[in-house]
Image: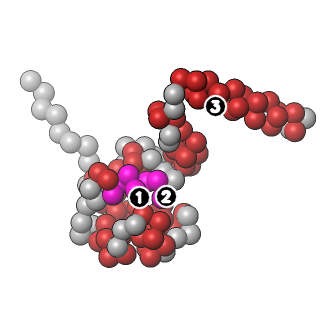
Amino acid sequence: MKKITPAQGPAPSDIFKDRLRAAREMRGLSQADLAAKTGLPPSSIAHFEGGKRKPSFDNLRKLSEALEVTTDYLLGRADDPAAATEADPLFRHAAKLTDNDRALAAEFLEMLAKRGEKKGE
């Protein structure tokens, strides 16, 4: 039986702290700004970025929403912050919609896309 070894590379905790700092800086936020947006103490942001502490699931969600990136990006499971940034804010609440509201949203998005195509002509 072949032994499976973990892939070489940075530890997941190193990826998280680096991605958190990069996403915060990409948004032009200080640690205090991010703390205010998430409702977390500034010291928590400093601890997360320093690798001294890891966020709870709830705090990870707060961080991803405030930074407009996916939790997968922060955790190193997705590599493209631009794709995560574009998709996450638009579809974040889609699962909460009723079937009727989902259909209405789809019609609205289609109308906006067509309007954008006309402006591009």
Q: Amino acid at mark 3?
A: Ala
The front one of 45 and 82 is: 45
Callout 1 touching callout 2 (CB < 8 Å): yes
Q: Is residue 31 visible?
A: yes
Name the residue carrying label 2.
Answer: 67
Name the residue carrying label 3.
Answer: 105
Q: Position of residue 120 (x, y in %)?
A: 86, 38
Secondary structure of the residue carrying tag 1 is helix
Callout 3 touching callout 1 (CB < 8 Å): no
Other-residue count near label 2 (Cα within 10 Å), few / some / many at <14 / 14–19 / ≥20: many
Q: Quadrant of residue 18?
A: bottom left
What span is colored magenta in the figure? 59-67
For residue 38, the mark is: none
Task: Say which residue appears at 49% left-offset and 58% top-offset.
Answer: 67
Q: Amino acid at mark 1?
A: Leu
Q: Is residue 62 magenta?
A: yes
Where 22 sits versus 9, above or below? below
**Among numbered discs 3 and 2, the one appearing first in the sequence:** 2
The front one of 110 and 45 is: 110
Name the residue carrying label 1.
Answer: 63
Secondary structure of the residue carrying tag 3 is helix
Q: Quadrant of residue 54?
A: bottom left
